Image (cartoon, rainbow, N blue to C red):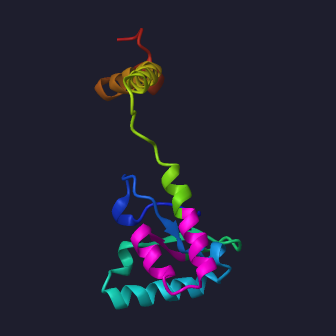
Amino acid sequence: MKKGHTPLAIGSNINTMSSVELAELTGKRTDNINAAIEKMFVDLELGALNFQGTYLSKQNKQVKCYYLPKRESLLLISGFNIRLRAKIIDRWQDLEEAEPKLPQTLHEALRLAADLEEQKMIMLPKVKAFERLSEAAGAHSLRESANPNIS
């Protein structure tokens, strides 16, 4: 798990870098990166739990890691050498360029609206089936409740 969201940012579009990815980019051990992150949290009086997560190690064990937004990862790497800082900054640029962009022209906006309408039409039968399931009363099976031809 290389990138994710901090526990506070679940459901948001905040990019983060995991301590695992930071270790891979810098050639440092993950436990050493985690220790540096924890020291940074103490120095900045930040709550570590707000950034903490887990990942599945190669040994198939749940291991602690941290998911840092841009500000915290840049603060962390400010103590690293210039080559390591460059790797992290380059990775942040990649993450930011991959973010979805808002339409800039009328044509782009209309294309986006058409694409969203098409996705909506694809999902409509499924939504209707779930609505029927939620309204179903009596002795119908799951299959019968989802069938639009059975009332």
Magenta stretch: includes residue 29: no
Residue displayed at 41% across by 87% down: 40
Which residue sits at x=67%, y=70%?
60
In the rendered image, residue 143, in percent from the top left (x then y), is placed at 48, 23
Q: Which residues are magenta?
A: 64-91
- The quarter of the image holding the C terminus is top left
Q: Nearer the viewer, residue 80 or 132?
A: 80
**x, y percent for residue 59:** 70, 74
- The residue under the point 39% across, 21% down is 110
**In the image shown, does 34 or 130 lie closer to the viewer?**
34
Majority secondary structure in the magenta region: helix
In the depicted structure, whether residue 129 falls above or below residue 79: above
Task: From the top left corner, tell me how far across and down residue 87 is, in percent.
Answer: 61, 70
On the question of residue 69 being in view, the answer is no
Q: Is 94 located above or below residue 64 in the figure?
A: above
For the N terminus, give its image quadrant: bottom right
Q: Would you identify the image quadrant in which residue 91 lies?
A: bottom right
Left or right, 23 with reference to 124: right
Q: Nearer the viewer, residue 111 or 11?
A: 111
Q: Residue furthest top?
A: 149
Is residue 96 among the parts visible in the rendering?
Answer: yes
